[in-house]
Image: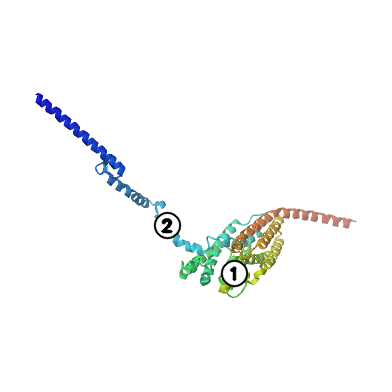
């Protein structure tokens, strides 16, 4: 009995010693695993080995992406696809100068002037017409840029400022540009047919100027004159769209004023490229005026202000309109006086500021038209008093 009991005690001690050794070994391996960050395949987490669990974690984003695509999530588009779409459309956006909206503004303002002047006394301009003409200005300015780049593809490649344009740099083929131009003109026609028939015919007749303008720089030093004729066609079209016909007494001086304004700001713009133009053989008013640019531009500014004043008198405009004309004149004088024709950056800055000229005049037209109702009412009251007084005086003479 004593021997059997001794054997049991020895066996128990052996088991305890073995358990302690196993525990120490296990603890050592766990510490080693933590320090080396190596996965221990013998451990179990949530019923899966660690390696299998990490493989499932790596597959989780793919499973989520597939689930989002099945359920139509727009956020699940691969970034590479979005990048490809952006890269594909970017050259066309550059072709129509969507990143440089100043041309759209300068094309729109003569339209807005005409629509504002044609409004009835005391009324706001037709907002629907302003929206249509703003859309048309965006589309047709883009179409004009496409036409210009098709004609000037070889010239643009030789000018520092324009050699990165899509056609000149080869990002877009000539055939692709023609297809894109067809789409632009189709959209422009869609806007035009919203107007009356007189306006449709008048608007379509300006397409010849848009197409031929880029050729003028090859044959004359006055391409800015042709550009002015095309860019200010809206001064005629806006009135026709709202009234059904063109009032030449108001629209003609407004149109000629716009042409003079275009010659002013585009001559400033052309001074940026005059050195390249001389080497290539391209003509412009910047080269024609040369060192006398400020004198010429002062003359065109004076002609512009005269025409705006004549248009205001034809429309019975009020004080806010003429105040706006005065501010426009001061703005242009400041541009011309401070212009450095040999500094391309200064020329660009002055050119972009002409957006303010169009806005100032438009605000003057709107305010002047709104105040016309009070002036007309006062004139009507004075006329009534005069007509009432005249028969009394005549009756007094008869009685005497």
Residue 287 position (above or below residue 79)? below
The answer to whether any part of residue 278 appears in the image is yes
From the top left corner, tell me how far across and down residue 115 is, in percent.
63, 60
Residue 195 position (above or below residue 32)? below
Question: Crowding at label 1, few (<14), some or many (≥20) Cα neighbours within 10 Å?
Answer: many
Question: Crowding at label 2, few (<14), some or many (≥20) Cα neighbours within 10 Å?
Answer: few
Q: Quadrant of residue 330?
A: bottom right
Numbered tag placed on residue 185 in the rendering: none
Residue at image position (24%, 38%) is 26
From the top left corner, tell me how far across and down residue 135 is, in percent.
55, 60
Which residue, as the protein is rendered here, is positioned at the far right? 400
Query: Which quadrant is home to the C terminus?
Result: bottom right
Direction from residue 143 to residue 86 in the image, left or right: left
Direction from residue 292 to residue 41 in the image, left or right: left
Query: Which quadrant is home to the N terminus?
Result: top left
Residue at image position (67%, 66%) is 294
Q: Which residue is mark 1?
A: 274
Q: Nearer the viewer, residue 80 or 368?
A: 80
Q: Which residue is mark 2?
A: 82
Q: Nearer the viewer, residue 58 or 371?
A: 58
Question: Element under label 2?
Answer: helix
């Amino acid at each position: 009995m004593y021997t059997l009991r001794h054997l049991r005690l020895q066996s128990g001690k052996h088991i305890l010693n073995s358990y302690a050794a196993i525990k120490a070994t296990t603890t050592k391996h766990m510490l080693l695993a933590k320090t080396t960050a190596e996965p221990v395949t013998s451990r179990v987490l949530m019923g899966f080995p660690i390696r299998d669990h990490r493989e499932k974690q790596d597959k989780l984003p793919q499973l989520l992406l597939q689930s989002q695509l099945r359920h139509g999530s727009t956020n699940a588009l691969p970034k590479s696809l979005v990048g490809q779409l952006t890269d594909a459309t970017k050259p066309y956006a550059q072709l129509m100068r969507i990143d440089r909206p100043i041309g759209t503004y300068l094309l729109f303002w003569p339209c807005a002037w005409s629509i504002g002047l044609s409004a009835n006394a005391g009324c706001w301009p037709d907002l629907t017409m302003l929206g249509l003409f703003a859309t048309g200005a965006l589309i047709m300015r883009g179409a004009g840029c496409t036409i210009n780049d098709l004609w000037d593809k070889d010239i643009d490649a030789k000018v520092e400022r324009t050699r990165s344009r899509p056609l000149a740099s080869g990002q877009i083929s000539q055939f692709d540009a023609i297809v894109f131009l067809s789409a632009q003109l189709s959209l422009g026609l869609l806007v035009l047919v919203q107007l009356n028939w007189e306006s449709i015919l008048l608007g379509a007749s300006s397409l010849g100027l848009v197409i031929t303008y880029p050729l003028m720089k090859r044959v004359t030093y006055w391409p800015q004159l042709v550009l002015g004729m095309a860019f200010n066609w809206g001064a005629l079209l806006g009135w026709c769209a709202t009234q059904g016909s063109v009032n030449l007494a108001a629209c003609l001086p407004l149109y000629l004023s716009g042409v003079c304004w275009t010659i002013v700001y585009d001559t400033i713009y052309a001074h940026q490229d005059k050195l390249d133009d001389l080497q290539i053989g391209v003509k412009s008013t910047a080269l024609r005026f040369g060192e006398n640019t400020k004198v010429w531009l002062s003359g065109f500014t004076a002609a512009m202000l005269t025409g705006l004043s004549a248009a205001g008198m034809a429309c019975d405009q009020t004080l806010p309109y003429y105040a706006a004309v005065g501010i426009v004149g001061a703005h242009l004088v400041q541009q011309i006086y401070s212009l450095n024709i040999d500094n391309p950056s200064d020329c660009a800055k002055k050119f972009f500021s002409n957006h303010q000229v169009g806005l100032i005049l438009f605000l003057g037209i709107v305010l002047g038209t709104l105040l016309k109702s009070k002036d007309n009412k006062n004139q009507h009251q004075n006329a009534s008093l005069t007509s009432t007084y005249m028969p009394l005086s005549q009756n007094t003479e008869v009685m005497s």
